[in-house]
Amino acid sequence: MKMDQFKNMNNWRKQWDHFFGDEFWNEFTPFFDNAHSQLNVYQGENELLVVLSLPGLVKVEDVDIFVNHQTLEVRGKINLNFKGFDLIQEGIFQGKFEREIQLPYTVKEDRIKASYKRGLLLIHLHKQIPDDSRIRVEVKDAES
């Protein structure tokens, strides 16, 4: 069995969007997101651990991680190819993925560590503790 019958499968959502409209698919968005990369977020006293399931990642260089205030973005590509074999049934996600995760608080940009082990990407983040110190502002007499 060849993959020819599935070659247009990637365009199915575009075709169905036209037929059903965007509102229909909005209800299913969380399911589509989870199919690409499942994740858990754990919270400690002053830190977070984000764990993404990324089976088949060949090189850690195939993943990019960005942090902006309270948003963590993970992008990458998983390529499952087995020499001498053609894919005839697909149940494990492969290809490009992008996840944007809203964090419960701002994290320190200089205290982020990421590692990959046994199909899991672990991202360790530390809470940005607000500096409550007061700064005295000098007022100058503008008339003198």
Image: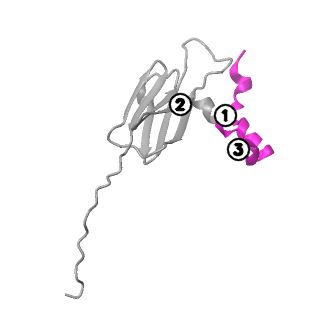
In the current view of this chain or complex, which residue is farthest to the top? 84
Which of the labelled discs sits on residue 26, or is there none? 3
The alpha-carbon separation of the residues under discs 1 and 3 comes to 10 Å
Taking the view exactly as shown, the residue that stands out farthest to the bottom is 143
- Which kind of residue does numbered mark 2 sit on? Asn
Q: Return the residue nearer the eye: 85 or 30.
A: 30
| Secondary element at tag 3 | helix
- Front-most of residues 19 and 137: 137
Can you name the residue that lies furthest to the right here? 19
Q: What's the magenta region?
A: 1-30
Q: Quadrant of the N terminus?
A: top right
Q: Which residue is mark 2?
A: 40
Specify whether residue 8 is in view: no
Q: Secondary structure at mark 2?
A: strand
Q: Residue at x 28, y 56 (%)?
A: 133
Residue 75 seen in render: yes
Q: Say whether residue 115 is left or right of residue 8.
A: left
